[in-house]
Amino acid sequence: MSDSVNLTIDRGEILGLIGPNGAGKTSLFNLISGVLRPDSGSIYLNGVPIDAAALYRRARLGIARTWQNMLLFRTMTVLENLLIAPRSYPGESILRVVFAQGTVRNAEARTRDRAMTTLARMGLEQTAKEMVVDLPFGQQKLIGLARTLMNDGPVLLLDEPMAGVEGAAYETMQRVVREEAESGRAVCVVEHNVSFIRDLCSRAVFMANGKILQDGTVEELIASSALTELYFGV
Amino acid sequence: MEYLATIGVLIAIYVILSSSYDLVIGYGGLSTVAHPIFFAVGAYTAGLLAIHSGIPAVLNVILGGVAAMIASVLLAASALRVSGDYLLIASLGFQLGLLQLIKNLDFTGGPGGLTAIPSTVTGAARTPFFLVVSGLLAVATVMGIRAIVNGPYGRAITAMRDEELAFTALGRDATSMKIVIFAIGCGIAGIAGGVYAYYFQYISPDQFEVLQSAAILTMVVLGGMGTTLGPVVGAVLLLAIPQAITFLNLPPGIMAPTQGIIFTVLVLLFLFLRPQGIIGLARKTL
């Protein structure tokens, strides 16, 4: 649940969203991306209200997100998971597939190149033909991020990307998220890993019970004893 | 020979029905028991046009498919806006309701059915002609569905079936895709209905009861849901095996129960020993 949330995410910014379990962080992502509809209030993208846009339309407008439990396409390969993910996918239309085969083929070729480039950024190009379920957990998380990056839109919402991730995958995730913000995307990260938030985020927001309690730098939030008590119970 | 050829026509028609049903439930992941009613829509449309109009047979069969497609879009567009599960309930209601309507209308022949559907071909050439036509349509159906489910459109269908929420959040319109898949599957069933009407020259409501869904579903499941050849193998086996048993020349009082027992044992054996079907692939899960 999110209650009276007022939040702005700017282009080029990495905003951290922290708070205890049940604070409403994922609910907020669900409201922004269109999984849930708010009872009141509005969501704006580049100053334009997008409340009427359904989930799939918001993705086409450029709101890309990851999921806590990844939701990868389990009967498909790594490459296939990425090929289905660009904002524009001509192969979705049976009429185009039948009557505009050249257009679909060309789009497929371009998407394939982008997908391999994205996998290479993650250091996972060698996994392209493997079934996604056969990969270790950390690599699956990176594939989830890679799939989301196939949406080249202005907004990137990352829901606990570091959960269960360590080592090389952790560093790759950090590097890629930083690069995305530097390219001009508005990035928001929900994370319990405070080090990740501290290393990456210029600004953070603390949520509890569906409300934003404090907005400031990561150091300001960590320094607040009231928030620390809420988060860690100490 | 005539008998075997008729079995061949039936097998071809059920290959079309089971393959199109597999497109809807196996690939599309849509829950529906209304496939027989779209078979019926196609059969009655083609049959009524054959009796009352001078429209050529080929066009009548196509119009039967179109009528089934339109009916399926009306059903899916309203049901899928609520949820995928609601389609199952709505399809059952649609199946039962429309069949009741057919039974109570005079111009459809009521419960007695539609008789004397004019034949396109007469004489000795009739059965071989229908065997070739239905066989070619069955091959075209299987290859057409294969083309749909391979390549970029098939990839979208698979992703939608695997994780619909993530699929939609990537920018894909899952509801529209489901309606299209449903319409294609039901339209193909309608065309099978048109061929059926022309071959047998008699159709009645009890040929399209909801239990037909169970028979077609069994063909799909036994053969392998979500595969191209699975429904073909399922249709051939489930139609050929009972007929093969008749060649044992058992006394009539024993024949029917024997067919039932052998058939049921085979189905149960497959369900326990190979639930993914004869052709089916083992599915991995996360």
Image (cartoon, coloured by chain):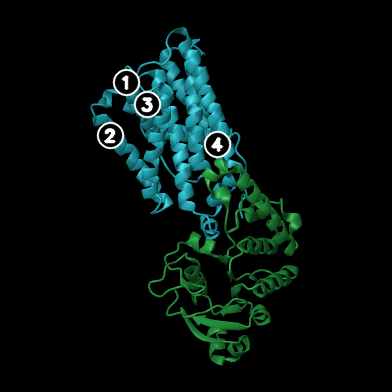
Chain colours: A green, B cyan
Q: Foreground mark, 4 or 2?
A: 4
Label 1, residues with CA under 10 Å away: few <14, some 14-19, many ≥20: some
Q: Tell me which chain the residue with mark 4 is part of.
A: B
Question: Would you say B107 lies left or right of A181 here?
Answer: left
Place of residue A148 in the rendered image (x, y in percent of width and height, measured from the top left): 61, 63
Using the numbered discs, state the Cα–Cα distance from disc 2 to disc 1 in whole angstroms. 22 Å
- The amino acid pointed to by label 2 is Gln
First along the sequence among labels 4 and 2:
2
Location of residue B33 by image quarter: top left
Q: Foreground mark, 4 or 1?
A: 1
Looking at the picture, do discs 4 and 3 lie on one chain?
Answer: yes
Residue in the foreground of this view, choosing between B181 and A162: B181
- The amino acid pointed to by label 3 is Ala
Place of residue A24 in the rendered image (x, y in percent of width and height, measured from the top left): 49, 75
Q: Residue at coordinates 53% horizontally, 47% vertically from top-left?
A: A93
Q: Foreground mark, 4 or 3?
A: 3
Using the numbered discs, state the Cα–Cα distance from disc 4 to disc 3 in whole angstroms. 23 Å
Label 2, residues with CA under 10 Å away: few <14, some 14-19, many ≥20: some
Looking at the picture, do discs 3 and 1 lie on one chain?
Answer: yes
First along the sequence among labels 4 and 3:
3
Using the numbered discs, state the Cα–Cα distance from disc 4 to disc 1 in whole angstroms. 32 Å
* Secondary structure of the residue carrying numbered label 4: helix
Q: Which residue is mark 3?
A: B46
Quadrant of the snapshot with the C terminus of chain B: bottom right
Mark linked to residue B100: 2
Q: Which residue is mark 4?
A: B145
* Secondary structure of the residue carrying numbered label 3: helix
Q: Tell me which chain the residue with mark 3 is part of.
A: B
- The amino acid pointed to by label 1 is Ile
First along the sequence among labels 4 and 1:
1
